Image: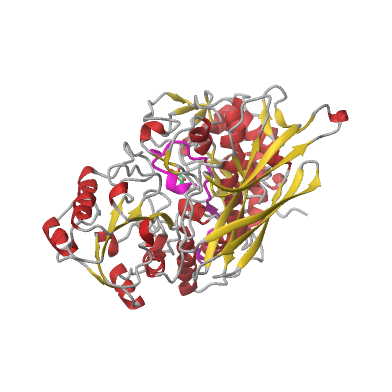
Amino acid sequence: MAKYKLSDLTLDEKLHLLSGKDNWSLSDAGGKLPSVFLADGPHGMRIYNKDGSVRPATAMPTLSAIGSTFNRRLAYLSGNTIADECIEEGAGVLLAPGVNTRRSPLNGRNFEYFSEDPFLSGELGASFIEGVQEKGIGTSLKHYCANLREYDRFYQGADIDERALREIYLEAFRGALRSKPWTVMCSFTPINGIYASENRYLLKDILRDEFGFDGVVISDWGAVHNIYKSVKAGLDLTMPYHPDNYKNLKDAYDRGLLRDEEIDFCVQNLLTLCERTENDKKVITTKKEERHENAVAIAKEAAVLLKNEDRILPLTSGRVLISGSFIRRPPTGGGGSSFVETPYVQRPLDALLNEKGGATYEMPIGQPLDSSGRMPIGLRNLYSAAYGKDAVVLCVGEDNKIEGEGFDRTSIRLNPQTEQMILDVARINPNVVVLLYAGSAIDMSAWIDKVKAVLFVGYLGEGVNEALASILSGEVSPSGKLTESFPLCLEDNCAGRELGNGYTEAFREGIFVGYRYYDKFEKEVLFPFGHGLSYAELVYSNLRVEKQSETEYTVTYDIENRSDFDAMEASQVYVSDVFSMVERPPKELKGFSKDLIPAHGKKTVSVTLTPRAFAYYNTSLHAWHIENGIFKIMVGASSRDIRLAADIEINLPDETQYSVYFSH
Ligand code: BGC
């Protein structure tokens, strides 16, 4: 028996319920309902105090960093940890995670999204949601959909063809919806001419009828332009509160533009949310220190070793110079509503490294980069200290002033002074190691050949320094992999130099986004999707592809560790339709696994391929479709480092013509 019923509410109470009580909570219908409180995420809980300050919380690695772990368990752990803080603070729903498919490295919010690959984003999104909701706290899957540019974000449109919409932009949402988030947040974006908040096709036909979503659709903050149109299209809750919302709804109702059934549909969804938030699962299981430890554990698997010439890393002996203000004040996340104010006091990276023993670390006198990590100060000290050292570690990159909500980057290169500094140090000392902090691709063409190693740090949350100390010292072998291809230059990306135009952006590349694009047009990249080195030597062998049914396969292979380092490895399974009636990407990620391969040990890895792995969206059928024929199954350490491959042939019976298709 439902506890909260439509029949208990007056029309006025219902209309108020559709438009929130304030910035962060739902109306309580005059005390008849609990007032559900919404907290921002996804990189930790963000709640404002009455005076506008933000409550302290654990800063977890960003979703971009969690993506790099390729580890479902860690996505779950992050959600689970944040949920404990939501329970403590009385929040009912965490406004997270975001699963938009990254298209351009310029997007200022790429760090809030897992990947350029929708399968990976959907899988990790699903695990994150599970981690939160297992603790009785709701999630909000966002930003549905195609929120891919911050420039003029309330109005800038996206024109997307049907196949790209399905295969690239909706697919990550479909994947994550498996974990049944209690809410979905619509994006600001007008998609094919209709605002997401008024887009009945997206909100009802696809989200509810096809994907089976049974929760509340919330607007992004300020995404509603005409509330009655939104309610009619299937938007249940307009946020934040504004007195005009009620007035406009009432007016539309009085004029006969809004029917009782349409109002009741949304109100019923909100009543269900109220019931869901009242549960007995809200038990805090972590202490503050454990939450920090969880942040560190995730960070340890998220840093990506891009280059390691002469195996210069780990640094186990000698005198090392380490430089950059990020040593003391590392960026923990990008800017905007996901930024977490952590009370954790960073321990400087050089101090942590010196505690590990082995190499000894010194900092140059003065600090050669200012607090933003960008403007050089006292470079002469840096250059003279670099001379004769066994290695120099340079901490450079971006922060929440360069990457954040409401603005995009205009370049993917480091600023010219930083590039010059790297080159100058590399002239003085041949053993330069760059620690690169950023939330999306960086063009390193100016200096990559001059340095020995690059560790892509990303934004690792408050555990960043501890994680880096473990990796640089060799205690932990890096195991992060890129979830976004790093192009040679911005122009090479599928969206090119496009910066947004305030009207609409045509996604002309269609389904060829990220590695699908670079592969299709045979473009060299700086570092491919899925790339990330290990200290260990990992050998893949013994591929077996076992047929479970005509469209289901178990892919099994061995990974052997021929080194003294215990190592985690993110192995990737790609599928290619060898002969197809339509254009398809040369390969697509359809499975992955993250496994511990102990030093001198071996692990047998198993990945399941479901019918989805072979299907594409057919625009004649308006449905997913599997075409009979040969498919190549490829197992790789990255999208361009395929280690094992085998062919299978799908032969569906005549009764299904030459193929099967399914609607969702
Ligand atoms: C952001 C959302 C966020 C909301 C509430 C919006 O501007 O796009 O991601 O959850 O604000 O802070």
Residue 448 position in % (x across, y down): 32, 47
Q: Decide whether residue 21 is among the magenta residues.
A: no
Residue 300 position in % (x across, y down): 46, 64
Relative to residue 539, is residue 405 depicted above or below?
Answer: above
Residue 13 or residue 208, whichever sits in front: 208
Relative to residue 214, is residue 91 depicted above or below?
Answer: below
Picture quarter with ligand 1: top left
Describe residue 21's horizontal placement relative to residue 59 as left or right. right
Residue drawn 58% across and 66% down? 597
Residue drawn 42% across and 61% down? 59
Magenta span main SS:
loop
Residue 363 or residue 427, whichever sits in front: 427
Is residue 10 visible in the rendered image? The answer is no
**Total marks placed:** 0
Q: Assign the C terminus to one quadrant of the image.
A: top right
Describe residue 174's horizontal placement relative to residue 320 as left or right. right
> Dividing the picture into quarters, in which one does residue 656 lie?
top right
Is residue 429 visible in the rendered image? The answer is yes
Give the colour scheme of this rendering: secondary structure
Residue 68 position in % (x across, y down): 49, 53
Residue 495 or residue 184, whichever sits in front: 495
Report the magenta residues as a range. Answer: 85-113
Q: Assign the N terminus to one quadrant of the image.
A: bottom right
Residue 582 position in % (x across, y down): 65, 25
Relative to residue 168, is residue 345 depicted above or below?
Answer: below
Q: Decide whether residue 112 is among the magenta residues.
A: yes
Describe residue 196's horizontal placement relative to residue 205 as left or right. left
Residue drawn 31% across and 51% down? 397
